Image (cartoon, grey):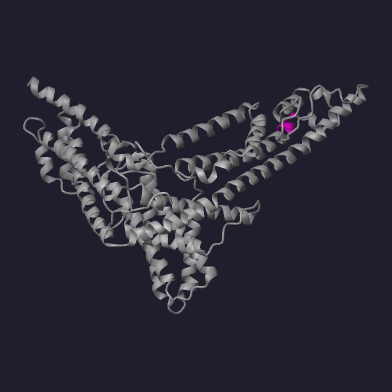
Amino acid sequence: MKKLLFVVLTLFAIQPVFADTEVDFSNSNVESQGEALYVAPQCPKISSDYAEALTTLRSMKNSILKEAGCETASEATTHLENLVLPGRSGALEIVKKNNGKMLSASDATKIENYANQVTLAVTDIFSLMGGSDCPVHEEKKSLMYKSLINIAFDALSSLGNVVGPYGAPLSVGFSALKGVLGGIYEYNENNSGYKFDVSETGRDEAKLYIQSLCAFYEFNLQAEKLLEASDRKNSYLNLENHLNNKIAFLTGQGVCNGCQDLANIVDDYQSTSPQALQLVKDINSANSEDLGTHLLDALQTKLWLEDQKNKLDIEEFEYNESVGPALLGKELEQLEEFLVYKEAEDFMHWIYDETRSSYKDYQSDVRDWVSSSYFDLEFFQKMTGRYRRSVEIAIPYTTVKKQKDFVSIYDYKEYLVNNTDKLPDYSWYKDAMLVEAEYNKSVKVLKNVNRFISSHNEYCSFFKNAGYYDAIHLKCNDPDMQAMNEAFLRQALPDPKLTNYLEQSKRERERLLSITGYTEEWSLHLPELFNQWNKIQDEQIKKLILK
């Protein structure tokens, strides 16, 4: 690993999940909310397999964990279920509502608490499974590890899609992170490597690799991207100073009627009392800048910030007193060596093999109807006394290497539809609807080629943005893959519908790339967020002067 990881992460107490209500700032213009300036590069994950993992977990609990000595592990599994089942829907709703945006203090705490609770529960089961009193068979233990990793990854991935107030990075506690990474490390220690090939088994292996890679990456973000204690503390102090100035201005004499009263009664950032909400409404109705909403946001963000600072102090103490972070860094380094530098190149080669296999399927599908229809065209020429090879259109080849007098399958299909008079009466291909159906069937196969090409490009972008380009640069510049892409485009671009399909895919890729960045740059961009309030404050000062 290129950097020694010194991890300082916030430690959260177990709290009820998603029990409180909060004021909705979604339609207001408060500076702590809005579009996130930076979100970490996203790992191109498959679905988290949450439902399948939970089903496996229940099966393991009901069979293996009832063995003698496993009762405690069974209870821990039940505890994990009881956390995930009610909590996950609330977490997903927050992410869905705020994806790419900064969360309120209340929502940020709910997301962090949920991820922390689930991760700690998974850690407990990992510890119990490693104990000698619970004789879990190795084969079933491996399945259990996979399921637990998927559940922890599912919970933690929500943190990678959102940021807190003012773009603050969200995190789980050090203990939770250390425990789950230990589980991943132990699982991969017993894994000699992934067996990628073009088969159902190989695809399952690729899926497992992606899940492990993305799980490692999410945990690595918690370790690398969430700042060292001193850096994060400075950002908190910077934000606290801004909030204090904002609150002092709004509660100052003559600025805002009722603002001091609001400051006196707000004492919770996870819920807002009816009295406070009514006071905010009254203050807002008296001015056009929604000063009540701005003050409530500042007061609640400050309360949240005080909690974050206290948790950071606890985590910093544990960090300074423990060898844990060094051990964690070593495990991350070994996981990185295995998942990135040992397996990533083989994984990228598997994508190429699947792309080539899908293109061969496309060639086979096209060959079936093109060869028979072209035979009919040639036979018609012979029937009318012409040289049978005087067909006006060349036979369309789907070879990867471009042929002379190239004709795309789309152009060939259009020729058949518009020249039914050049086919013998017995030919099925005089039926334009049949020709369209054959062509559309081929297009479905061709789209699968594009999906693998898109996966290739997406993983190359991910490895580049995540700092691992040196592991896969040869595969990302593979001339065989480039030739496959060119062959696909030769067939796709002549078709207006496919061109539109490709344009939509391109826009989605550009959207994903546009949100990549680094959360450690959070503190550098805080002043940009403060500018929004500074403009409002300047307007208020002008009004006071005019009075």
Taking depth in this image into account, of 89 and 198 the one nearest to the observer is 198
The single residue placed furthest to the top in the displayed view is 546
398 part of magenta stretch: no
Q: Please indicate whether residue 366 sits to the left or right of residue 333 in the image.
A: right
Query: What residue occupies the far right of the structure in this picture?
Result: 385
Quadrant assignment for the C terminus: top left
For the view shown, which residue lies furthest in the bottom direction? 68
> Where's residue 393, x and y in %?
79, 24
Magenta stretch, overall SS: helix
Magenta segment, which residues?
432-436
Q: Position of residue 380 (x, y in %)?
A: 88, 26
Residue 83: x %, y % from top left? 36, 60
Residue 294, can we see it? yes
Residue depicted at 50% across the width and 68% down the height: 141
Q: Residue 336, percent across and down?
A: 47, 53
- Residue 211 appears in the picture as rendered: no
Q: How many marks?
A: 0
Is residue 433 in the magenta section?
A: yes
Where residue 249 sits, quadrant-wise, is: top left
